[in-house]
Image (tube, rainbow, N blue to C red):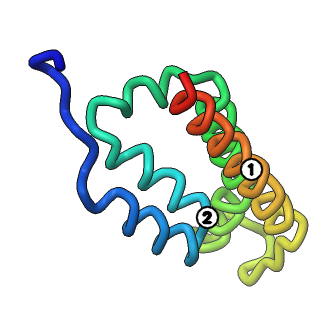
Amino acid sequence: MAADSNPPSSVRMPVAVLLGLVMPPLGVLAWIGLSGSQRRDYLHSNWVRAGISIAVLSAAPLIFVIAAASLGMWPDPNPNPVGFGLLLVAGGALGTVLTGLGILFVDRN
């Protein structure tokens, strides 16, 4: 083992499983975040990068509408952005699957 290696956290599995049961994208992010020196390998994976990017980009429109409405810059002070919510769910699911595949591919190598 190299001197700069940092082992994964001992609570990585239970935290990732508990967060994954509540909200799957958080479980995947907890797995990566608590993986010690292997985190760099995960974040260099194109699958993980694509998954996280899709999840973030799918959440951006909904967050924008919520922020604009709360600041009074949206025409409707009480918006109901169902389409953006569905985009968030679909993008979050796709991003979670892609990130999970990236984790599996990194662990396999």
Q: What residue type is labelled 2?
A: Pro
Q: Which residue is the site of mark 2? A: 24
Could you say whether the residue bearing mark 2 is in a helix, strand or loop?
Answer: helix
In which quadrant will I find the N terminus? top left
Q: Badge 1: few (under 14), some or many (20 or more) residues near its Cα, within 10 Å?
A: many
Q: Badge 2: few (under 14), some or many (20 or more) residues near its Cα, within 10 Å?
A: some
x and y, in percent, of residue 94 in the image: 78, 49
Q: How far apart are marks 1 and 2 (CA)?
A: 15 Å
Q: In this rendering, is residue 54 above or below 4?
A: below
Q: For the view shown, which residue lies furthest in the top direction? A: 2
Q: Quadrant of residue 98?
A: top right
x and y, in percent, of residue 108 in the image: 57, 29
Q: For the view shown, which residue lies furthest in the right direction? A: 83
What residue sits 78% from the left and 64% below the top?
89
In which quadrant will I find the C terminus? top right
Whether label 1 touches label 2, CB < 8 Å = no
Mark number displayed over residue 49: none
Q: Quadrant of residue 92?
A: bottom right
| Frontmost residue, 73 versus 24 | 24
Could you say whether the residue bearing mark 1 is in a helix, strand or loop?
Answer: helix
Q: Which residue is the site of mark 1? A: 58
Residue 67 placement, left or right of 95: left
